[in-house]
Image: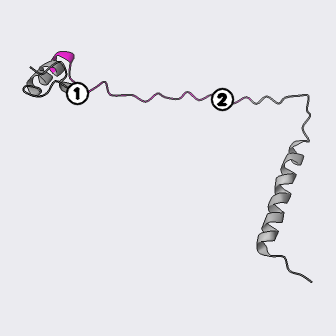
Amino acid sequence: MTRIAPSHAALALGLALLLAGPCSQATEPQGRSVKQHTAKHKVAKPRFETGSGETVSERERRLYRECRGRPNAGACEGFAR
């Protein structure tokens, strides 16, 4: 008697399971759709920080102070003198 290699046996089992899957699902009636009532969960939106916690006037004063003598580019654009 010949022995079957384990890889061939696993392949045969996998094919058998693959082909058996659609057959078991075909037993439902085709014309009727089954509606499932699922409870919809309300998903909470993540809360984002609204910036660095400084007001617009505080930010402008800080940028004028920090950008003195620097090139007029990046964050300092419009604030360098």
Kindly give the residue lying farthest to the top in the view shown. 57
Please, what secondary structure does the residue beneath circle 2 have?
Answer: loop
Quarter holding the N terminus? bottom right
Give me the residue at 18% from left, 18% from top: 78
Residue tagged by mark 1?
74
**CB-based contact (under 8 Å), mark 2 and mark 1:** no
- Mark 2 crowd level (few <14, some 14–19, many ≥20, 10 Å Cα): few
Residue 58 found in image quarter: top left
Q: On the rendered structure, is 80 left or right of 1?
A: left
Magenta includes 42? yes
Residue 47 found in image quarter: top left
Residue tagged by mark 2?
39
Q: CA distance from mark 2 to mark 1?
A: 49 Å
Give me the residue at 53% from left, 29% from top: 43
From the image, give the main secondary structure of the stretch colored magenta.
loop
Q: On the rendered structure, is 59 left or right of 5?
A: left
Residue 31 found in image quarter: top right
Q: Nearer the viewer, residue 11 or 41?
A: 11
Q: Nearer the viewer, residue 69 or 29?
A: 69
- The boundaries of the magenta stretch are 37-58
Quarter holding the C terminus? top left
The residue type indicated by label 2 comes to Ala
